[in-house]
Image (spheres, rainbow, N blue to C red):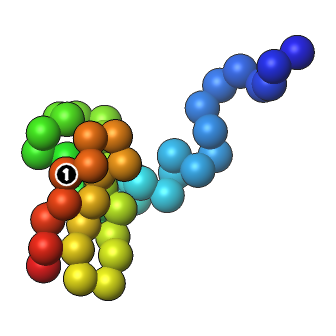
Amino acid sequence: MAGKKGSSPLVYKYYKVSGDKVERTKKECSRCGKGVFMSNHKNRRSCGKCGFTEFV
């Protein structure tokens, strides 16, 4: 078998549940759209899918 079915446990790092609301902890990529998150670095954010970089 290739692996277990279902969602990865790492996906829970991207969301925070407080009461009835669900909040995203990371920013989404403006090029790729919903479901693609940007990684946080020291002085920038970057998308792992398209390579888009935002400097902060």
Q: Residue 14 in the image: x percent, y percent?
A: 41, 54
Q: Residue 5 in the image: x percent, y percent?
A: 71, 21
Q: Going by the picture, which residue comes out furthest to the front?
A: 51
Q: Going by the picture, which residue comes out furthest to the top?
A: 1
Helix, strand or loop for disc 1: loop
- The residue closer to the viewer here, 26 or 52, is 52
Q: Is residue 19 visible?
A: no
Q: Is residue 17 left or right of residue 44?
A: right
- The residue closer to the viewer here, 18 or 48, is 48
- The residue closer to the viewer here, 16 or 45, is 45
Q: Residue 15 in the image: x percent, y percent?
A: 39, 53
| In the image, residue 28 above or below residue 35 | below
Q: Is residue 31 left or right of residue 4?
A: left
Screen quadrant of the N terminus: top right
Amino acid bearing label 1: Phe
Q: Quadrant of residue 39?
A: bottom left
Residue placed at 80% from the left, 24% from the top? 3
Q: Is residue 19 left or right of residue 43?
A: right
Residue placed at 64% from the left, 46% from the top? 9
Circle count: 1
Q: Residue 12 in the image: x percent, y percent?
A: 52, 51
Q: Which residue is mark 1?
A: 52
Q: Going by the picture, which residue comes out furthest to the right?
A: 1
| In the image, residue 35 above or below residue 24 | above
